[in-house]
Amino acid sequence: MNASPDEPSTAPDSPHRAPRISRAWRASLLRFDKAGQPLFEADGMLVTEQHGNAPARVLAGGEWASLRRAYPDVPVTDLTGYLIAPGFIDLHVHYPQTDVIGSPADGLLPWLNHYTFPQETRFAERSHADEVAAFFLDQLLAHGVTSALVFATSHPNSVDAFFEAAQQRRLRMITGKCLMDRFSPDGLRDDTEQSLIDTETLIGRWHGQDRLGYAITPRFACTSTPEQLRGAGELAARYPDVWVQSHVAENVDEIRWARELFPASRSYLSTYDDFGLMRRRSVYAHCIHFDDTDRALMRERQTAAAVCPTSNLFLGSGFFDFDKALSAGFAHALASDVGGGTSLSPLATMAAAYHVGREGQTKAGLSLSPSRLWWLHTAGGARALDLEGVVGNLQPGCEADFVVINPKATPLLARRTAQANSLDELLFALIVLGDDRAVVQTVVA
Ligand code: GUN
Ligand code: ZN
């Protein structure tokens, strides 16, 4: 991209106050209102302001002509022809599975045993974790993803490596050490008591540092003893602002196994509830094979689902029911689930979600419109993380994480978007035909 920003303007300040720096961009602008409806300006302006070292925040967004009058002196980067949209949020992804993408298997459990666990064992070595964390985060940025809820491995080192790399890039990222004290191979299996001590140490070291947050991370019920799940639930109660993440109801063999291991629980999902692991800021990946009681429990506990359509199609796990999630009223948003997922691109994930939505469609009309899909990967992800108004949108006060998208990035995309007559047509063309080539710049904080 040729456009180079002008010098930012620095407001005069007393020596005791951090300087305030304002900047602006001119481009098409996509944001969302509180109801999740898109707000679109074909000729828009985004104004940000930065105080000292804090992340820059959005000061204003809107139509160019009127906003420029309100901010006549702020230096502007002219990106006419491009689309500025909120940075994407990946609600569930495994950074240590970067080298597992595209490993085919009969289903989840053989895939874990043959490909995933052996790769994750390598993260005992700090230098390997550092190298993969840096590569992974640069890939997220190349795909326009600015925040994510991420699985590390069971090695505390893998958490340190990830947070250090995220901190260097000033990203808002959440991760945690996998808890897995049974049915896991040597080199990955942790010790019940030590795993809980390590989790608490990592919370103290990282949670709330800069833009980083910790997630208590039992891998899934099948690889944790009841003692480990109980300990995780106690930590979840003691640290209510820390996130909780796990997997649930992904695959029929996994469900059968979980039911055998925890027969006293009403369902696989309620196993987590029985150990105090469903609360605000809990996010469960997949949530495919639910009944209505499970869905009601998700809503009651203010727990969110990370929907992973490329992973579910690749591993043959099943189809998330968007209609039932919406009518039950529990939070859900989109995720790549790399390495079960096949792409880090939110555009690819949205396309797969559209196909999955059609599969389960019971009502007339599009089950998932393009602007709804886009919301589910931005502001909807922020809502699922209890970070609404912080990331995932470009409303005043939000942290200024955004993507600059080129609707003419490839000849086919240029040809198709030139004929788009509405916002939905433009977004659909990007979702169906776009990839990381359409993301020309990712701006963080
Ligand atoms: N269930 C337990 N671990 C995993 C994992 O790494 N990926 C997926 N997709 N499901 C899981
Ligand atoms: Zn996963």
Image (spheres, rainbow, N blue to C red):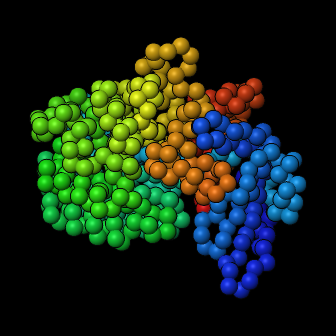
Residue 335 placement (x, y as % from top left)? 44, 41
Residue 12 horizontal/vertical position (percent)? 79, 78
Q: Is residue 318 above or below residue 236?
A: above
The x and y percentages for residue 95 are 38, 53
Quick check: 48 above or below 284?
below
Question: Residue shown at 22%/36% (left/top)?
Answer: 268
Q: Quadrant of residue 247?
A: top left
Q: Residue at x 23, y 58 (%)?
A: 234
Residue 102, position in %: x, y? 37, 38
- The image quarter in which residue 30 lies: top right
Left or right: residue 18 versus residue 338 is right
Count of numbered circles on the image:
0
Residue 125 visible in the current orientation: no
Residue found at x 67% / y 67% = 50
Q: Is residue 16 above or below residue 39?
A: below
Residue 413 falls left or right of residue 200: right
- Which residue is the extreme one toward the front? 300
Residue found at x 42% / y 57%? 174
Q: Is residue 438 left or right of residue 98?
A: right
Quadrant the C terminus occupies: bottom right
